[in-house]
Amino acid sequence: MSERPKGRTAFVRAAWGLSAVFALVVGRLKLLQHERLQTSAFDLGVYANVLWNTAHGRPFFNAFDGRSFLGQHFIPALALLAPLLRVWSDAAALLAFQSAALALAIPAVYLLAERELDDRRAALGFAALCAVFAPLHRASAYDFHPATLAVPLLAWSLYFWRSGRRTALLATLALTALVQEDLPLVLVGFGAYAAWEASRRRDRNGRRDGLVVAAVAAPYFALVVFVLMPHFAGGWRASYWEYYARLGMTPGSLAAGFVLHPWRLWALTLGDPEKAAAVLGLVGFTSGLILLAPREALLLAIPLALNLISANPAQYRLQAHYSATMIPFLFYAMIAGYARLSRRGALRGPRALAALALAAAGSLWNLPVYSRPTDAARLQSARALFAEIGPDDSVAASANLVPHLCFRNGITMLNGPDTPARWVALDARTRVTSYLSHVEADFAGRHLDRLVFTHDDLYLFDMKRAP
């Protein structure tokens, strides 16, 4: 083993220091977001309920639709978080965990950049860019979703791969495959790319390992998507893949659609001006560095295509958590682009640093707002409303109230003028997305005689109260 370069420890500590600052600052912002009633049933309330049920002996039961959540998202690794909710009985625990997990990507980016560039200062610059990277903060600011956990997992996988740490790589990839149903397909691309790169270097062992990853991930992906998820969902058409229904809803039709009509892939992705604009936005956040690394950018192909062929606008616009799986690959390509830029022509060093600084400035300019100020009296009113509801009572609630009431099996969104729930809790002032806001307004108009609490546009209806 070679001797650690002199002075390297200080840079590694600085990268971990950035990680700690990120975890503390972003964690606090997420807790404020939750405290101020600005988190939502979609997705924090649902995941918190599923994990609360898992922690209490009902694995992956989703009280919102009365069946296993594994039919909507296949996330077996998330069961590892269930004990956290036994210790910290609040949906905010998932927000704190997510912030800490995202922070772990920062030292991974540093170590990867240090290895690829042999320049500790530039590597620390990439770690700092990761800490302020706008797509990362967009994923973080959006509630809670397991897709964000792919950021640290894939970042460390890239480092383990490039540093030849085979055991750590395979263990991290195995965990990644269990985080969400589409990640095994991303790993197919990762394995194929690793095998191709190893072939170029005439590394037979690396080529074999890459092919093994791809060969294992591909059938596992097919098993999850075409067998397990439909089984838990009660039928193929109830699965997550309804987003891709226009491509075909069976394995045969999906494959035939691209084999017989390959032009559809272009028409459904970069041939769409709105989707092309979303991709250009990602290029902009890298200040064009990924354009200098077309080979490394191939790692983006599968996660990017999965987003662009979706019929979900938030997904193909790369909003919220949907760009999370691409972030580590963006950094890998950026690092490669930086390396090439720093070796070319006059002023190569300053020019490369300027590109890195421009990327950081662009991200800082586009950082999302995590939460908006809320007056203390309104928050006190919300706590008083929650105190009226018994721990075992059934509740139908506005989207932003659900995460505060989700540790029960009788929890749902309001879906009509009548409800079997004991209580109905509404927030008329919420700016968190609620797909049922018109239903809530109609409900309030019909049941004013059952209103038992109202303050600061918060309403609580007792459905057992005689009209």
Image (cartoon, rainbow, N blue to C red):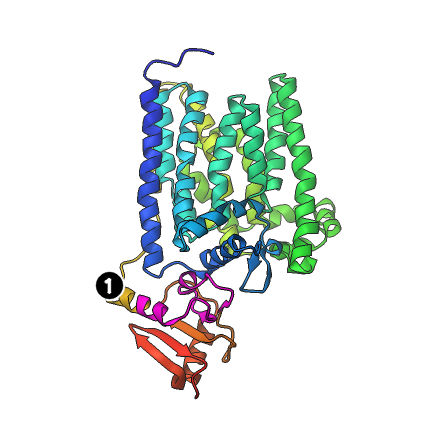
The answer to which image quadrant residue 205 occupies is top right
Residue at 45% in and 82% down: 464
Residue at 54% in and 37% down: 300
Q: Position of residue 236 (x, y in %)?
A: 69, 57
Where does the C terminus fall, quadrant-wise?
A: bottom left
The residue range painted magenta reads: 383-412
* Magenta span contains residue 390: yes
Residue 294 shown left or right of residue 237 in the figure: left
- Above or below residue 387? Residue 346 is above
Residue 186 shown left or right of residue 318 in the figure: right
Amino acid identity at mark 1 = Ala
Residue 370 seen by the camera: no
Residue at 61% in and 46% down: 266
- Above or below residue 96? Residue 64 is below
* Magenta span contains residue 106: no
User: Which residue in the structure is indicated by mark 1?
Assistant: 376
- Above or below residue 260? Residue 406 is below
